[in-house]
Amino acid sequence: MSLRLYDCAWVRIEGAEDSPVQAFKNPRNPAAFDIAGHQYDIDGRSIPGDNTAPSVASLLSLSEVRELGLSTGYNRDLRQDVGSRIK
């Protein structure tokens, strides 16, 4: 299965499929996305050197996001929280 990440996308990661997390463009590296404290490329692969990053299991569709009651837009509060955990 192929996927393409985009800013504010909701994804499921392996080992935590019941708790979707949001992907954000990394402000320091425009080729990377920050997801749950790890960095991934546009295809959902972990950035080389991060052997602890779980795999992206799936990208949620817009209808899934709505059904789960998740935000479909940019969450500034979450972005600040995620950004503070990224090295």
Image: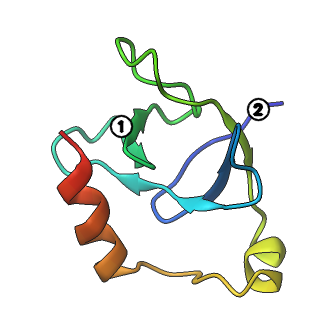
Q: Quadrant of the C terminus?
A: top left
Residue at point 55%, 25% (across, down): 45
Q: Is 75 on the left or on the right of 4, as rendered?
A: left
Can you identify the residue that label 2 sits on? Answer: 2
Indicate left or right for 34 with 13 as reference. left
Type of amino acid under label 1: Ala
Sequence-earlier tag: 1 or 2: 2
Label 1 crowd (10 A; few <14 / some 14-19 / many >=20): many
CA separation, marks 1 and 2?
17 Å
Colour setting: rainbow
The spot of residue 30 in percent (x, y) is 27, 42
Q: Is residue 27 left or right of residue 24?
A: left
Q: Is residue 81 above or below residue 51?
A: below
- Front residue of 16/33: it is 16
| Quadrant in which the N terminus is drawn | top right
**Which residue is labeled 1 in the image?**
32
Q: Residue at x 23, y 57 (%)?
A: 83
In the rendered image, residue 61, in percent from the top left (x then y), is placed at 78, 65
Amino acid type indicated by mark 2: Ser
- Give the structural element (helix, strand or loop) at label 2: loop
